[in-house]
Image: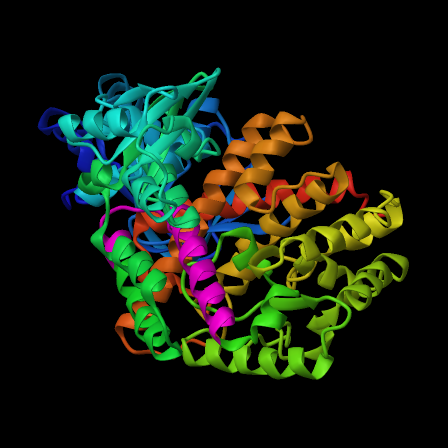
Amino acid sequence: MERFDFSYPPYDNLSPHERNTLQSAVNIAFFDDNEIIIQPRQPIEHLYVVIKGLIKEVGSDGEVVALYHERDTFEARALVEGSSQHQFIVEEQALVYTIPKDTVTEIMKSNAQFGAYFYASVAEKFASVSGNKKEHEFASLFTAKVRNAYREDTTWIEGSISLLEAAGIMKERRTKSALVRHEGRVGLLTESAFRDVIIAEAPSSDPVHRWTQFNLIAVDIDDFVFDALLRMMQFKIQRVIVEEHGRPIGAMEQIDILAYLSNHSNLVAQRLERAETLDDLAIIADQMNESIQVLSDNGVRAPQLAQLMQVLNGSLFEKAWRLIAPPELYEQSCLIVMGSEGRGEQILKTDQDNALIFREGVPPETASRAAGEFSATLARLGYPPCRGNIMVSNPEWCKSLPEFKKMVRGWCLSPSPTSMMNLAIFIDAQSVAGDGTLLNEVKAHLEQYLDNDAGMLMMFARAVEQFDSHSQGFFSQLLHRESSQKMDIKKMGIFPVVHGMRALALEARVEETNTFDRIRKLTELHRIEEQLGRDVAEALSYLMDLRLKAGLEAIALNRNDTEEPNQIDLKSLSTLERDLLKDALQVIKRFKGVIRFHFHLNS
């Protein structure tokens, strides 16, 4: 008999003895076209592994929920539960291995990881797979906690001592900073403060607290090192305060996290800080994809990369706008990013989603001219124009404060599909340059018209069904020979999660814009069930990983995917990746059902 192939998950995890056990018990069965292998509620006595052919899994509603190709395994859960709720039908003549239930149970008892592959929760399965990336110093940046990275040798001084005494202590300790205790507060004294002392010609007898910064940026000792890095980059600082239970206990400097730090992302941030021309920015923008590739190759997942790129892109946009906009416009306007960029979920340069709000008194032609140059500059830096023209060069998204308020008010008072989509894009907005209070003012104005009108919320939420183009589901489309073997990962998976959570967040007045933050907050508010929240978050992470992988492959092949930026070639996926994709789409189907019920979309 043909020898079982142990080269793929979860069978590659079996010991020699377990492999012998399986090999001695396995058989091969042939099934003809349209033959039913498993009926709903039929007792299950075997685990099936496809050798050749194609099997389709059909749900109780007639939808094809999965396809099984070479190396795919089914129906593991039903083996334990006793029966399946679904039907398994041969689409193309199939040869399959049949592994007896007793053999599978015996191996599961000796190999917990083998059993977990089939029976772990969806969230646990995705999380487990994400941990199988090759280990590298880059990966530790996203797993190490601050407590493991910062040095517990912070210098502490009292705010009442003189500058001369403080300088002596810092020289003796060979440190560039010290934490200062003064009147129940904790502050930070750095060597740069002594430059200010010299410029001000202050006496060396001045008490230290007068030159201490008490408005500090902090991280918790149990935060990830990555969080500390983000804060340093976001606030353009060299160190952060480390807190435990809300109490400052020390400081962490950039040098403390060098072992965890990617030189690529750090250098990009430093070069952005020093950039003086648009030509400088063009060079830096080209380096960003290289940084993403390096980090991705070394185990960093898409959601963490998206957070990093949100900081870097925000710095790049701010610098570009500062170089382009006249000073009087820069100070009297607010440049905002929206959509995936505003949510902190964009990694590769896909499109521009931005807008400009400017104060009354700013000549509209001045704003329009600068906005047009900004859009052209972003295109030069590799950010394609938005297909929907949602960018500052479009007068609809470059308005004075009163006009912007009028526009968002109109979306609520006349809730058409177009206005609801504009609202969805805008509520993800974040300020990246200029006067951020302008955006805050528009959002506060918008709040007055969001009265939880059931009709408006229903129309807003209905967009989750925007791409449900086939009544029998995505997998059934693949059975047609003329159909593409590609999936639009954004339409089929990412968008329904993003917009569904956005609708729930809008209803619950959740201020967070990042989808993962929204999931966390909505779970805390009991707006979604905790297990569903975990499953959806992990499914979204996995889909973002697939999307990033496809995008990086397109870049490596110098392929222009601007027409199909979200297309996943299913033929290129491994058996494990297809299995996880099936699980992810099932989670999203379940989540969409929750959204339909919650917002009465079927009425």
Q: Quadrant of residue 524?
A: top right
Q: How is the image coloured?
A: rainbow
Query: Residue 565: x, y in percent?
Result: 46, 70
Q: Residue at x 39, y 61 (%)?
A: 570
Compared across the picture, whether 503 is left or right of 479 comes to right
**Front-lying residue, 232 or 451:** 232
Query: Residue 272: x, y in percent?
Result: 35, 63
**Front-lying residue, 17 or 506:** 506
Query: Residue 447: x, y in percent?
Result: 80, 47
Q: Residue at x 58, y 37 (%)?
A: 519
Q: Main secondary structure of the magenta part?
A: helix
**Front-lying residue, 300 or 284:** 284
Q: Quadrant of residue 152?
A: top left
What is the residue that sits farthest to the left in this orientation? 16
Which quadrant is the N terminus positioned in? top left
Q: Quadrant of residue 45?
A: top left
Residue 177 magenta: no
Q: Is residue 88 above or below residue 128?
A: below
**Front-lying residue, 99 or 314:** 314
Q: Residue at x 71, y 46 (%)?
A: 503
Q: Which residues are magenta?
A: 294-323
Q: Is residue 407 above or below residue 214?
A: below
